[in-house]
Image (cartoon, rainbow, N blue to C red):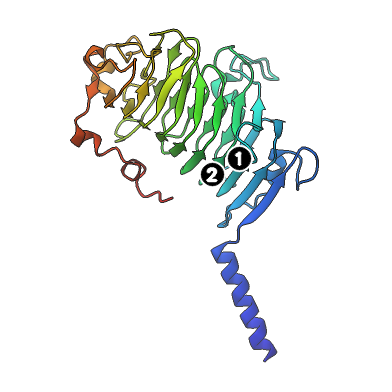
Amino acid sequence: MKRMLAACFLLVAISSMALGQTKKITVSKDGKGDYKTVQEAINAVSDLSNAETIIYIKKGVYKEKLRLPETKTKVHFVGESVDGTILTYDDYAAKKDSAGQNIGTSGSSSFFVFGNDFTAENITFENSSGPVGQAVAVRVTGDREKFINCRFLGFQDTLYTHGDNSRQYYYKCYIEGTVDFIFGAATAVFDSCTLYAKNGGYYTAASTPEGKKFGYVFLNCKLTGNAPGGSFLLGRPWRPFAKVVYINCFMDQQVRPQGWDNWGKADNEKTTFYAEYKSYGPGAASDKRVGWSHQLSAQDASQYTVSNILGDWKF
């Protein structure tokens, strides 16, 4: 009988490990949580776990250069308040490392996300270095990465959607910046987000790999800012096969009528895919857009659904 009970308990234990049990960690600067720093909490996550780890982050300004390694998967950040929970650092591309070399754009990131299946809610991510050139707030490399009601603060190169095979989803997020403040190679959906243009520049600089069906897709977003009228373009191609599409987006007076830029290379006009469908607002000058961009038909626009863009990623 005892052997049978022991076997049953072992079976239950093995089943629990296989299914995965959600782990919860609290971070609080005042010492009333499990850890005082976010990086300590990340380090405490089990490697390659099948279970989700929820890290609750209390209000406060956490000045840390953060790294979520590839081995830390299914990590879920939840901030106490989007305005009050701030993860920040102040590196920038021209800053020197210990060898006297520039740390570069990638090295400037305040938060590196390598682990797959990462989610963040109600958090502000910031690069606080100011208008000093390239300075990344978050660099996202892993696959199936999701941000809900988050803020991304910075100037040039605020959000780096880095991974060539990365799929990313942003819902009701606020993203601000100047030049190329959303850039990179990932397939990314921005759903009901606010893009806030400061000074002058470009909303996007996609580097979509050749052969990818989708690059950046903005659904029901608001493009606004405090930059002068006509001082921003919807995008320019960091790489020749950049793909950027805006669907049902409000475009304020910051958007220049021509809409798009070829980054000084006429050949890019043959390989990029820049398109809009039902843009509206002062900056929605569809009849004045560059001739090599596209205004989609209803049928063409219908393919731009979250499930179609992100494929077999279910959430």
Q: How far apart are marks 2 and 1 (CA)?
A: 9 Å
**Outermost residue toward the right?**
31
Secondary structure category for the residue under label 1: strand
Q: In this view, does 53 lie above or below 164?
A: below
- Residue denoted by label 1: 68
Picture quadrant where residue 125 is located: top right
Q: In this view, does 131 lie above or below 196?
A: above
Query: Badge 2: few (under 14), some or many (20 or more) residues near its Cα, within 10 Å?
Result: many
Q: Of residues 206 and 195, which is closer to you in this image?
A: 195
Please say if the residues under marks 2 and 1 sit with CB atoms less than 8 Å apart: yes
Q: Residue at x 46, y 44 (%)?
A: 144
Secondary structure category for the residue under label 2: loop
| Residue 9 on image: x %, y % | 65, 78
- Residue denoted by label 2: 118
| Amino acid type of the residue tagged 1 in the rendering | Leu
Q: Residue at x 56, y 43 (%)?
A: 70
Instruction: Determine whether, in the image, residue 257 is placed left or right of residue 149.
Output: left
**Outermost residue toward the front?**
281
| Residue 48 on image: x %, y % | 58, 52
